[in-house]
Image: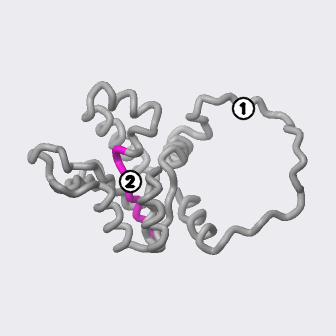
Amino acid sequence: MSVHIIIDGYNLIRRSHRLSALDQRELQLGREALLDTLAAYRRNCLHKITVVFDGASAPDLFFSSERTRGIEVTYSHQGESADAVIKRMAARKKEKALVVTSDRDIIDYVSARGAATIDSLSFEQKIAEALYGDIELSGAENEGGWTPTTRKKGPGHRASKKERRNMKKINKL
């Protein structure tokens, strides 16, 4: 089953360390860098990718929807937020959708309708792993070795059916 990845564009850009630096210089640079990264990722996967940007305050020069480098780019209309567009798309796709956002309102809404979710930083890490191998974007050094703990070592708690379905979609990335 193919997954339709629906991305909250500005949420991902502003959560990413690399993309937010470009976005602060110029809004278009952040969008272009995100689309370049997704286009490179798209060459390695067969999933349909849609990026939704908030076009409520954008000039009328933007098309409401366009296709660039195999990625569908959608701008919300005047008076409508990108959140509303994402919710509508995810509600239509249901189990076939994987929504990339860190916005709790969107996560709760689309999860209730059967769509899987992944937060923006985790998705960025998955893309980096797919493109560049096993690298760490957070900047934290992993010193390795054993960490003392009093945690139980037996079988863990089995995730709920909803959580297992969500992880199944995320693992397809």
In the picture, the disc for residue 7 is: 2
- Mark 2 burial class by Cα count in 10 Å: few <14, some 14-19, many 20+: many
Amino acid type indicated by mark 1: Asn
Left or right: where 4 falls relative to 57: right
Left or right: where 106 falls relative to 81: right
Q: Choose top left, top right, bottom left or bottom right for residue 113.
A: bottom left
Residue 54: x %, y % from top left: 26, 49
Query: Disc 1 marks which residue?
Result: 142
Asked if residue 81 can be seen in this view, the reply is yes
What's the residue at 42%, 73% (across, down)? 94
Amino acid type indicated by mark 2: Ile
Which residue occupies the foreground of this view, 154 or 172? 154
Circle 2: element type: strand
Check residue 2 for magenta coloring.
yes
Report the Cα–Cα distance between label 2 and label 1: 29 Å
Q: Choose top left, top right, bottom left or bottom right for residue 144.
A: top right
Check residue 121 for magenta coloring.
no
What's the residue at 29%, 37% (across, down)? 32
- Please report whichever mark, 2 or 1, sits nearer to the chain's N-terminal start: 2
What's the residue at 44%, 52% (across, down)? 103
Residue 105: x %, y % from top left: 43, 59
The residues colored magenta run 1-10
What's the residue at 40%, 64% (across, down)? 4
CB within 8 Å, label 2 to label 1: no
In this picture, is 131 found above or below 70? Answer: above
Residue 87: x %, y % from top left: 35, 65
In the picture, the disc for residue 55 is: none
